[in-house]
Amino acid sequence: DIIMSEPTFEKELDSELSTILLAGILSATDSFLAPNTSAKALEMAAELQSRGANQSEVIEHLFKQKSFANLRILGRLLGNLQLDTAHKMAWTNVTSSDFELTETSFADIDGWSGQLLRHINETDIVVAFIEKDEHALIQIRTGNDIDLSSLAQMFEGVIENVEHGFDLLVQGKSVPEIQS
């Protein structure tokens, strides 16, 4: 709105700047799949495309291109995936031996927990147990506006609220110790 209402900015809105702004919208709305996607976001995206924004290029770079290491660790996440259809819950884990075997690191996880939630039918909660250094990181993601605040209070650890869930860092424990 600010850019469109200010003539100085609007005049400078070429295809390159339009593509950059569209990348921000697509990132913030998870390519228009997130619940926070508004009609205004769709209208702005359409306006930016009419000004030359390259949506397919942005989607390719933000959502489709993954590094080899990122795909290798995804294979371990999928290989370890468990599903409880009665409770609409899925969980997986990645241990330090998985990182060693795939020659990857924690940085290669790259938001797969949220992606798993989006791609597993009839699942409302996904939990990923990930070994990070000498600690365990538990990533809990949920769809359907499930309030996880009471669940988060049950754990001892450093909690970081993220979109659609939270991350819990448990100091000094391995993934197998937490899962048992």
Image (cartoon, rainbow, N blue to C red):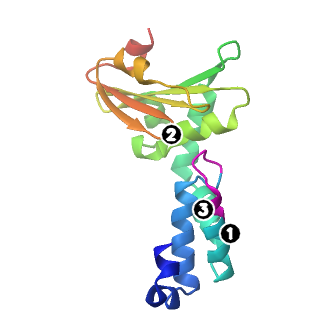
Who comes first in sequence, dot 2 or dot 1? 1
Q: Which residue is mark 2?
A: 102
Q: Which residue is mark 1?
A: 56
**Residue 83 within the magenta-colored segment of the rendering:** no
User: Where residue 41 is drawn, which disc sits there?
Assistant: 3
Q: Position of residue 16 (x, y in %)?
A: 54, 82
| Disc 1: CA contacts within 10 A as few (<14), some (14-19) or many (>=20) | few
Q: Quadrant of the C terminus?
A: top left
Q: Main secondary structure of the magenta part?
A: loop
The residue range painted magenta reads 33-42
Residue positioned most to the right: 121
In three-dimensional space, the C-alpha distance between marks 2 and 1, rounded to whole angstroms, equals 31 Å
Q: Nearer the viewer, mark 2 or mark 3?
A: 3
Provide the secondary structure element on which disc 1 rests. helix
In three-dimensional space, the C-alpha distance between marks 2 and 3, rounded to whole angstroms, equals 39 Å
Q: Position of residue 49 (x, y in %)?
A: 66, 76
